[in-house]
Amino acid sequence: MQGKIALEEHFAMEDTLSDLERRLSDNGDWADTRRRLLDIQKLRLEEMDRNGIEMVILSHTAPGIQELLDTGEAVDLSQRANDLLAEEIARHPDRFAGFAALPMQDPEAAIIELTRCIKDLGFKGALVNGFTQKDVPDSVIFYDIPEYRPFWAVLNEFDLPFYMHPRTSIASRSQHYEGHPWLFSSAWGFSVEASIHSLRLIGSGLFEELPKLQIVLGHLGERIPFDMWRLDHRIERQPCGYSLPQPMSYYLRNNFHLTTSGNFYEPVFNFTLAEMGVDRLMFSVDYPYEDMIEGAAWFDQLEMAKETRQKVGRTNAVDLFKLNLT
Ligand code: ZN
Protein backbone atom coordinates (compact mmCIF):
# COMPACT_ATOMS: atom_id res chain seq x y z
CA MET A 1 0.00 0.00 0.00
CA GLN A 2 1.28 3.44 -0.91
CA GLY A 3 0.60 6.48 1.29
CA LYS A 4 0.88 4.76 4.67
CA ILE A 5 1.31 6.87 7.79
CA ALA A 6 3.34 5.57 10.74
CA LEU A 7 3.31 7.09 14.19
CA GLU A 8 5.51 5.29 16.68
CA GLU A 9 8.75 6.22 15.03
CA HIS A 10 11.63 7.43 17.16
CA PHE A 11 14.64 9.69 17.02
CA ALA A 12 17.29 10.74 19.53
CA MET A 13 19.88 13.47 20.03
CA GLU A 14 23.57 12.80 20.77
CA ASP A 15 23.16 14.05 24.34
CA THR A 16 20.12 11.88 25.06
CA LEU A 17 21.82 8.70 23.93
CA SER A 18 24.13 8.06 26.87
CA ASP A 19 21.70 6.16 29.10
CA LEU A 20 20.29 4.20 26.22
CA GLU A 21 23.81 3.38 25.18
CA ARG A 22 24.62 1.94 28.59
CA ARG A 23 21.58 -0.31 28.38
CA LEU A 24 21.66 -1.37 24.76
CA SER A 25 25.29 -1.23 23.64
CA ASP A 26 25.78 -4.96 24.24
CA ASN A 27 23.02 -5.68 21.71
CA GLY A 28 24.62 -6.79 18.47
CA ASP A 29 22.86 -4.22 16.30
CA TRP A 30 23.25 -1.19 18.58
CA ALA A 31 25.62 0.66 16.20
CA ASP A 32 23.03 0.45 13.44
CA THR A 33 20.13 1.42 15.74
CA ARG A 34 22.17 4.38 17.03
CA ARG A 35 22.85 5.59 13.50
CA ARG A 36 19.19 5.31 12.61
CA LEU A 37 18.00 7.08 15.78
CA LEU A 38 20.19 10.08 14.96
CA ASP A 39 19.28 10.13 11.28
CA ILE A 40 16.09 11.78 10.09
CA GLN A 41 16.56 12.93 6.52
CA LYS A 42 18.58 10.23 4.81
CA LEU A 43 18.25 6.55 5.79
CA ARG A 44 14.79 7.13 7.18
CA LEU A 45 13.44 8.88 4.12
CA GLU A 46 14.96 6.26 1.84
CA GLU A 47 13.28 3.48 3.81
CA MET A 48 9.98 5.35 3.85
CA ASP A 49 10.15 5.70 0.06
CA ARG A 50 10.96 2.03 -0.38
CA ASN A 51 8.12 0.88 1.86
CA GLY A 52 5.21 3.06 0.77
CA ILE A 53 5.24 5.23 3.91
CA GLU A 54 4.29 8.78 3.01
CA MET A 55 4.51 10.35 6.45
CA VAL A 56 5.79 9.52 9.93
CA ILE A 57 5.01 11.33 13.16
CA LEU A 58 8.35 11.43 14.99
CA SER A 59 8.89 11.18 18.73
CA HIS A 60 11.85 11.16 21.09
CA THR A 61 12.88 7.62 22.04
CA ALA A 62 12.25 6.05 25.47
CA PRO A 63 12.82 6.65 28.29
CA GLY A 64 14.02 10.10 27.24
CA ILE A 65 12.81 12.96 29.37
CA GLN A 66 10.90 10.72 31.79
CA GLU A 67 14.02 9.28 33.45
CA LEU A 68 15.59 12.66 34.28
CA LEU A 69 15.55 13.32 38.02
CA ASP A 70 16.22 17.03 37.75
CA THR A 71 13.15 18.99 36.69
CA GLY A 72 15.18 21.88 35.26
CA GLU A 73 17.15 19.46 33.11
CA ALA A 74 13.92 17.80 31.97
CA VAL A 75 12.47 21.16 30.92
CA ASP A 76 15.66 22.15 29.09
CA LEU A 77 16.10 18.84 27.30
CA SER A 78 12.49 18.57 26.19
CA GLN A 79 12.69 22.09 24.72
CA ARG A 80 15.88 21.22 22.87
CA ALA A 81 14.48 17.91 21.59
CA ASN A 82 11.30 19.61 20.40
CA ASP A 83 13.19 22.46 18.73
CA LEU A 84 15.44 20.01 16.91
CA LEU A 85 12.44 18.01 15.80
CA ALA A 86 10.69 21.14 14.51
CA GLU A 87 13.77 22.03 12.44
CA GLU A 88 13.89 18.55 10.92
CA ILE A 89 10.17 18.61 10.13
CA ALA A 90 10.56 21.99 8.43
CA ARG A 91 12.96 20.39 5.92
CA HIS A 92 10.26 17.94 4.79
CA PRO A 93 6.88 18.97 6.16
CA ASP A 94 5.15 16.74 3.64
CA ARG A 95 6.93 13.66 5.09
CA PHE A 96 7.37 14.38 8.81
CA ALA A 97 5.22 15.55 11.71
CA GLY A 98 6.01 15.59 15.41
CA PHE A 99 4.89 14.59 18.89
CA ALA A 100 5.98 16.75 21.83
CA ALA A 101 8.45 15.39 24.39
CA LEU A 102 7.27 16.67 27.77
CA PRO A 103 8.81 17.34 31.20
CA MET A 104 6.12 15.48 33.14
CA GLN A 105 8.22 15.96 36.30
CA ASP A 106 6.35 19.27 36.62
CA PRO A 107 2.74 19.31 35.38
CA GLU A 108 2.81 23.11 34.95
CA ALA A 109 5.99 22.97 32.87
CA ALA A 110 4.48 20.13 30.83
CA ILE A 111 1.47 22.32 30.02
CA ILE A 112 3.71 25.20 28.94
CA GLU A 113 5.84 22.97 26.68
CA LEU A 114 2.78 21.18 25.27
CA THR A 115 1.19 24.51 24.41
CA ARG A 116 4.39 25.80 22.77
CA CYS A 117 4.76 22.59 20.75
CA ILE A 118 1.21 22.62 19.45
CA LYS A 119 0.72 26.36 18.95
CA ASP A 120 4.20 27.44 17.84
CA LEU A 121 5.76 24.28 16.40
CA GLY A 122 2.63 22.71 14.90
CA PHE A 123 3.05 19.34 16.62
CA LYS A 124 0.24 16.79 16.48
CA GLY A 125 -0.01 15.77 20.13
CA ALA A 126 2.42 14.36 22.70
CA LEU A 127 4.28 11.09 23.13
CA VAL A 128 5.33 10.42 26.70
CA ASN A 129 7.47 7.46 27.72
CA GLY A 130 5.40 6.12 30.59
CA PHE A 131 5.70 7.12 34.25
CA THR A 132 8.12 9.84 35.24
CA GLN A 133 10.90 9.75 37.78
CA LYS A 134 11.67 12.84 39.81
CA ASP A 135 14.34 13.91 42.35
CA VAL A 136 15.36 10.40 43.42
CA PRO A 137 16.00 7.28 41.31
CA ASP A 138 13.48 5.26 43.28
CA SER A 139 10.48 7.31 42.14
CA VAL A 140 7.52 6.41 39.96
CA ILE A 141 4.86 9.02 39.19
CA PHE A 142 1.78 7.99 37.22
CA TYR A 143 -0.43 10.64 35.62
CA ASP A 144 -3.75 9.58 37.08
CA ILE A 145 -3.13 11.58 40.26
CA PRO A 146 -4.98 14.91 40.74
CA GLU A 147 -1.85 17.01 40.09
CA TYR A 148 -2.08 16.08 36.39
CA ARG A 149 -5.75 16.95 35.82
CA PRO A 150 -4.94 20.48 34.58
CA PHE A 151 -2.49 18.95 32.08
CA TRP A 152 -5.13 16.57 30.74
CA ALA A 153 -7.68 19.39 30.56
CA VAL A 154 -5.34 21.48 28.39
CA LEU A 155 -4.59 18.54 26.08
CA ASN A 156 -8.32 17.89 25.84
CA GLU A 157 -8.87 21.49 24.75
CA PHE A 158 -6.34 21.06 21.95
CA ASP A 159 -8.29 17.98 20.85
CA LEU A 160 -5.08 16.08 20.05
CA PRO A 161 -4.04 12.68 21.42
CA PHE A 162 -1.48 11.48 23.97
CA TYR A 163 0.66 8.52 22.93
CA MET A 164 1.43 6.43 26.02
CA HIS A 165 4.73 4.80 25.10
CA PRO A 166 6.19 2.09 27.36
CA ARG A 167 9.41 2.32 29.33
CA THR A 168 11.49 -0.04 31.40
CA SER A 169 10.41 -0.32 35.03
CA ILE A 170 12.76 0.51 37.89
CA ALA A 171 14.60 -2.42 39.46
CA SER A 172 13.96 -1.27 43.06
CA ARG A 173 10.21 -1.47 42.34
CA SER A 174 10.29 -4.71 40.38
CA GLN A 175 11.20 -7.55 42.71
CA HIS A 176 8.92 -9.79 40.69
CA TYR A 177 11.37 -9.53 37.77
CA GLU A 178 14.46 -10.33 39.85
CA GLY A 179 16.87 -12.77 38.24
CA HIS A 180 15.21 -12.51 34.84
CA PRO A 181 16.49 -9.33 33.15
CA TRP A 182 14.60 -10.09 29.92
CA LEU A 183 11.35 -9.57 31.83
CA PHE A 184 12.26 -5.87 32.23
CA SER A 185 12.68 -5.47 28.51
CA SER A 186 10.38 -4.74 25.60
CA ALA A 187 9.66 -8.49 25.41
CA TRP A 188 7.38 -8.29 28.45
CA GLY A 189 7.86 -5.40 30.90
CA PHE A 190 7.06 -2.66 28.38
CA SER A 191 3.50 -3.87 27.98
CA VAL A 192 3.02 -4.36 31.71
CA GLU A 193 4.02 -0.74 32.40
CA ALA A 194 2.00 0.84 29.64
CA SER A 195 -1.12 -1.25 30.23
CA ILE A 196 -1.19 -0.68 33.99
CA HIS A 197 -0.67 3.05 33.48
CA SER A 198 -3.57 3.12 31.00
CA LEU A 199 -5.87 1.17 33.30
CA ARG A 200 -4.97 3.57 36.13
CA LEU A 201 -6.02 6.51 33.92
CA ILE A 202 -9.35 4.81 33.29
CA GLY A 203 -9.89 3.80 36.92
CA SER A 204 -9.22 7.35 38.10
CA GLY A 205 -12.31 8.59 36.25
CA LEU A 206 -10.23 10.74 33.86
CA PHE A 207 -12.45 9.89 30.88
CA GLU A 208 -15.65 10.60 32.79
CA GLU A 209 -14.27 14.05 33.45
CA LEU A 210 -12.86 14.52 29.91
CA PRO A 211 -14.85 12.22 27.62
CA LYS A 212 -13.24 13.56 24.42
CA LEU A 213 -9.67 12.80 25.54
CA GLN A 214 -7.86 10.25 23.34
CA ILE A 215 -4.90 8.02 24.25
CA VAL A 216 -2.85 6.02 21.75
CA LEU A 217 -1.22 2.72 22.69
CA GLY A 218 1.30 0.84 20.57
CA HIS A 219 2.08 -2.86 20.13
CA LEU A 220 -1.55 -3.71 19.35
CA GLY A 221 -2.74 -2.40 22.69
CA GLU A 222 -0.09 -3.66 25.13
CA ARG A 223 -2.10 -6.89 25.60
CA ILE A 224 -5.19 -5.07 26.89
CA PRO A 225 -7.56 -6.25 24.11
CA PHE A 226 -7.15 -9.87 25.23
CA ASP A 227 -8.34 -9.02 28.70
CA MET A 228 -11.20 -6.64 27.92
CA TRP A 229 -13.92 -9.18 28.47
CA ARG A 230 -12.33 -10.53 31.63
CA LEU A 231 -11.75 -7.04 33.05
CA ASP A 232 -15.45 -6.25 32.70
CA HIS A 233 -16.49 -9.68 33.91
CA ARG A 234 -14.39 -9.73 37.05
CA ILE A 235 -15.03 -6.09 37.96
CA GLU A 236 -18.76 -6.74 37.72
CA ARG A 237 -18.43 -9.72 40.05
CA GLN A 238 -15.93 -8.11 42.38
CA PRO A 239 -15.57 -4.33 41.90
CA CYS A 240 -12.71 -3.93 44.41
CA GLY A 241 -13.11 -0.16 44.42
CA TYR A 242 -13.96 0.30 40.73
CA SER A 243 -16.85 2.75 40.84
CA LEU A 244 -17.21 4.21 37.34
CA PRO A 245 -20.60 4.25 35.60
CA GLN A 246 -19.27 2.37 32.56
CA PRO A 247 -17.27 -0.86 32.26
CA MET A 248 -13.56 -0.67 31.39
CA SER A 249 -14.21 -1.77 27.82
CA TYR A 250 -16.40 1.30 27.26
CA TYR A 251 -13.50 3.67 27.94
CA LEU A 252 -11.09 1.49 25.96
CA ARG A 253 -13.39 1.63 22.95
CA ASN A 254 -14.15 5.35 23.26
CA ASN A 255 -10.90 6.88 24.47
CA PHE A 256 -8.13 4.65 23.09
CA HIS A 257 -6.57 4.04 19.68
CA LEU A 258 -4.08 1.24 19.08
CA THR A 259 -1.21 0.88 16.63
CA THR A 260 0.53 -2.11 15.05
CA SER A 261 3.99 -0.97 16.19
CA GLY A 262 6.33 -3.92 16.79
CA ASN A 263 3.55 -6.50 16.81
CA PHE A 264 3.40 -7.94 13.32
CA TYR A 265 1.29 -11.02 13.93
CA GLU A 266 -1.84 -11.52 11.87
CA PRO A 267 -4.03 -13.43 14.38
CA VAL A 268 -3.44 -10.73 17.01
CA PHE A 269 -4.10 -7.99 14.45
CA ASN A 270 -7.41 -9.58 13.43
CA PHE A 271 -8.47 -10.10 17.03
CA THR A 272 -7.61 -6.50 17.94
CA LEU A 273 -9.45 -5.18 14.90
CA ALA A 274 -12.54 -7.15 15.92
CA GLU A 275 -12.37 -5.93 19.54
CA MET A 276 -11.62 -2.24 18.88
CA GLY A 277 -13.26 -1.64 15.50
CA VAL A 278 -11.82 -0.33 12.26
CA ASP A 279 -11.79 3.31 13.39
CA ARG A 280 -9.39 2.69 16.28
CA LEU A 281 -6.50 0.82 14.77
CA MET A 282 -3.55 2.45 12.96
CA PHE A 283 -0.43 1.26 11.20
CA SER A 284 2.99 1.90 12.80
CA VAL A 285 6.43 0.31 12.80
CA ASP A 286 8.47 1.36 15.93
CA TYR A 287 11.49 2.26 13.81
CA PRO A 288 14.42 1.90 14.32
CA TYR A 289 13.84 -0.81 16.92
CA GLU A 290 11.84 -2.67 14.28
CA ASP A 291 12.52 -2.95 10.56
CA MET A 292 10.45 -0.66 8.39
CA ILE A 293 10.49 -3.26 5.63
CA GLU A 294 9.22 -6.01 7.92
CA GLY A 295 6.38 -3.91 9.36
CA ALA A 296 5.33 -2.50 6.00
CA ALA A 297 5.56 -5.78 4.07
CA TRP A 298 3.58 -7.56 6.79
CA PHE A 299 0.85 -4.92 6.75
CA ASP A 300 0.66 -4.85 2.96
CA GLN A 301 0.07 -8.60 2.71
CA LEU A 302 -2.63 -8.81 5.42
CA GLU A 303 -5.98 -9.93 4.11
CA MET A 304 -8.60 -7.24 4.66
CA ALA A 305 -11.10 -5.13 2.77
CA LYS A 306 -9.67 -2.26 0.74
CA GLU A 307 -11.47 0.34 2.87
CA THR A 308 -10.15 -1.25 6.07
CA ARG A 309 -6.55 -1.11 4.80
CA GLN A 310 -7.02 2.51 3.77
CA LYS A 311 -8.38 3.45 7.19
CA VAL A 312 -5.82 1.54 9.26
CA GLY A 313 -2.91 2.39 6.97
CA ARG A 314 -3.71 6.06 6.48
CA THR A 315 -6.98 7.88 7.01
CA ASN A 316 -7.55 7.08 10.69
CA ALA A 317 -4.24 8.87 11.40
CA VAL A 318 -5.11 11.78 9.09
CA ASP A 319 -8.37 12.29 11.01
CA LEU A 320 -7.06 11.75 14.56
CA PHE A 321 -3.97 13.94 14.20
CA LYS A 322 -5.62 16.48 11.85
CA LEU A 323 -2.83 15.96 9.33
CA ASN A 324 -2.69 18.30 6.41
CA LEU A 325 -3.05 15.46 3.90
CA THR A 326 -5.93 14.44 1.70
ZN1 ZN B 1 8.50 2.60 20.41
Image: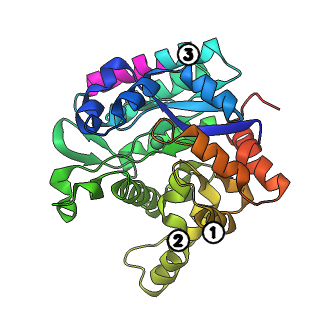
Q: Is residue 34 left or right of residue 91?
A: left
Q: CA distance from mark 1 to mark 3?
A: 37 Å
Of the residues shown, which amino acid type is indicated by label 3?
A: Glu
Q: Look at 22% across and 55% down and name the residue there.
A: 181
Q: Quadrant of the N terminus?
A: top right
Q: Main secondary structure of the magenta part?
A: helix
Residue on which disc 2 sits: 226
Check disc 2 and report its element: helix, strand or loop: helix
Q: Which residues are magenta?
A: 71-83
Q: Is residue 15 left or right of residue 262?
A: left
Q: Earlier in the sequence, mark 1 or mark 3?
A: 3
78 in the magenta segment: yes
Q: Earlier in the sequence, mark 2 or mark 1?
A: 2
Q: Look at 47% across and 15% down and name the residue there.
A: 84
Q: Look at 51% across and 20% down and name the residue there.
A: 85
Q: Nearer the viewer, residue 305 or 166?
A: 305
